[in-house]
Image: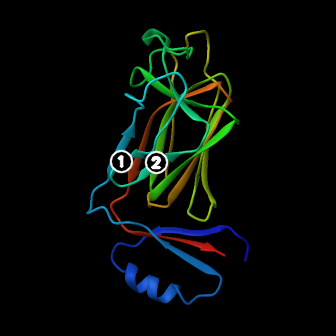
Amino acid sequence: MTNESIKLFDAPENIEEILKSAKDLPEVKIVQTQQTNGQIQCGLITFEGLGGNFLPIPPQNLGFTIATFETGWFTDLEVAAGGTAPFNNLPSPVTLAGFTLANDKDIFLSNPVSSVSLFYSSFVNVAIEAYDINNNLLQFVGGLANYVAPPNTIWNQLTINLGSNVISTIRVIGGNFQTAIDNIQLCVAPARGLYVTSL
């Protein structure tokens, strides 16, 4: 079997029976996701209070997961707040995130989530990719460059929603010092689920 995802589903009623029967199958790995007491839980990372001047982003604890930002992520302030980033009209003024050292950067999650959304303002096209715990690509969504003139005030939203708590890594693809990010929302789904992948 190839190293690819083969099944994604929720099983709140008979998950234990499925786990018991599936664990003995050859070349199959089961990742059980977390329970959330019947309610969707969401957390919002606004970057407010983290300062500007290209400071690194510390881990963000949302309660149900901790988001750790890969080296190269930084915060800055919008122009209207005295920052150096050529952006204004942020979804949650006045702090934004960007990255350097590469044209893509990861966000690692201590516990998997079901959905991710963010706002971007960028000189270049932007995309987000969601990966499972085994680094299998689950879904990709992209958006066009939207920078018009400095300071840019246009922000567009990108969303990935898989319905089950299987997203362990988020990759943001944009431009080195060319892409601004704000208001990253992470959510966990209420039902327990199974994500089945081949080894």
Q: Estimate the x, y position of residue 131 in percent, counting from the top left.
A: 59, 56
Q: From the viewer's side, name the closer residue of 124 and 98.
A: 98
Question: Viewed as shown, does residue 76 lie left or right of 28?
Answer: left
Q: Amino acid at mark 2?
A: Ala
Contact, mark 1 vs mark 2 (Cβ under 8 Å): yes
* Vertical placement of residue 107 versus 191, above or below: above
Q: From the viewer's side, name the closer residue of 83 and 153.
A: 83
Residue 19 shows in the view: yes
Q: Which mark is residue 67?
A: 2
Q: Which residue is mark 1?
A: 62
> Residue at image x 46%, y 10%?
82
Q: Which color scheme did the rendering employ for the protein?
A: rainbow
Residue 162 shows in the view: no
- Nearest to N terminus: mark 1 or mark 2: 1
Q: Which mark is residue 175?
A: none
Which structural element holds mark 1?
Answer: loop
Which quadrant would the N terminus be assigned to in this image?
Answer: bottom right
Classify mark 2: residues with Cα within 10 Å, few (<14), some (14-19) or many (20+). Answer: many
Q: Amino acid at mark 1?
A: Leu
Q: Estimate the x, y position of residue 173 in percent, counting from the top left.
A: 65, 38
Which structural element holds mark 2?
Answer: strand
Quarter where residue 183 is shown: top left
